[in-house]
Image (spheres, grey):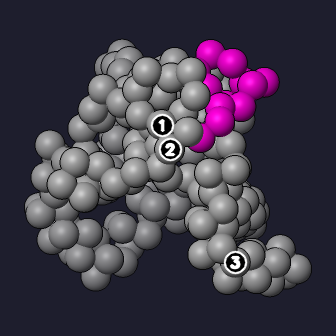
């Protein structure tokens, strides 16, 4: 419970952090997990769309703006997800269906999670995502209101807006925990 209150308290300080963020290094640069990159500049993208950072030693701008303290708050919240999964999974597990028994939209969600899981390099991460997949599919299958809302809003998706651009690929394609762009065998 302390982590939740600490996270909430930290969120109230995010505005100050954004102002001071140029002093806080972001994620380590490509290929070197032990060295941090200095932020040289933070700016709004072309047409005011999105934020970017110029990182020292990188030719590509970093898409987005993971401000230091905001990332720390997010990290605290991310620790709650595995705890919730570990707590709820055994309770819900007896209700999970085999993938072929799910409705068509839920089978598609299951399939997409399977692609994500196949691209993960570490067994522990694969297992965590498999549990999340099963819980999400359970929720969508057995609560038709959520499934119908989900189906309705997904038809609005613009896949061109989701595709990675060259800047995003530069920072993502060589991660040591994920096989970028690989297609699992069927």
Q: Quadrant of the C terminus?
A: top left
Q: Magenta residues, as a range?
A: 28-39
Measured Cα–Cα span from mark 2 to mark 3: 21 Å
Q: Quadrant of the N terminus?
A: bottom right
Looking at the image, is 122 positioned above or below residue 27? above
Magenta residue check for 125: no
Give coordinates of residue 23: x percent, y percent: 69, 50
Q: Residue furthest front?
A: 40
Measured Cα–Cα span from mark 2 to mark 1: 5 Å
- The numbered mark at residue 121 is none
Quadrant for residue 72, please give it.
bottom right
Please tell me whether mark 2 sits on a helix, a strand or a loop.
Answer: strand
Please tell me whether mark 1 sits on a helix, a strand or a loop.
Answer: strand
Left or right? Give the position of 139 relative to 26. Answer: left
- The numbered mark at residue 54 is 1
Magenta residue check for 35: yes
Identify the main secondary structure in magenta: loop
The residue at the point 29 percent across, 49 percent down is 45
The answer to whether any part of residue 4 appears in the image is: no
The answer to whether any part of residue 129 appears in the image is: yes
State which mark lies toward you, 3 or 1.
1
Find disc 2 in the rendering and name its residue: 41
Measured Cα–Cα span from mark 3 to mark 1: 24 Å
């Amino acid at each position: 419970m302390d982590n939740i209150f600490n996270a909430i308290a930290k969120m109230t300080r995010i505005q100050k952090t954004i102002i001071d963020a140029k002093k806080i290094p972001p994620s380590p640069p490509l290929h070197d997990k032990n060295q941090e990159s200095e932020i040289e500049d933070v700016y709004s993208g072309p047409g005011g769309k999105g934020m970017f950072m110029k990182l020292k030693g990188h030719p590509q701008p970093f898409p987005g703006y993971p401000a230091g303290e905001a990332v720390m708050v997010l990290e605290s919240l991310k620790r709650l997800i595995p705890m919730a999964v570990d707590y709820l999974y055994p309770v819900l597990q007896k209700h999970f269906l085999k993938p072929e028994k799910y409705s068509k939209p839920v089978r598609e969600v299951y399939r997409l999670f399977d692609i994500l899981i196949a691209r993960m390099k570490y067994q522990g991460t694969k297992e965590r995502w498999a549990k999340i997949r099963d819980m999400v599919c359970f929720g969508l299958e057995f609560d038709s209101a959520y499934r119908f809302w989900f189906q309705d809003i997904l038809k609005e998706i613009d896949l061109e807006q989701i595709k990675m651009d060259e800047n995003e690929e530069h920072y993502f394609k060589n991660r040591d925990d994920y096989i970028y762009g690989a297609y699992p065998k069927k």
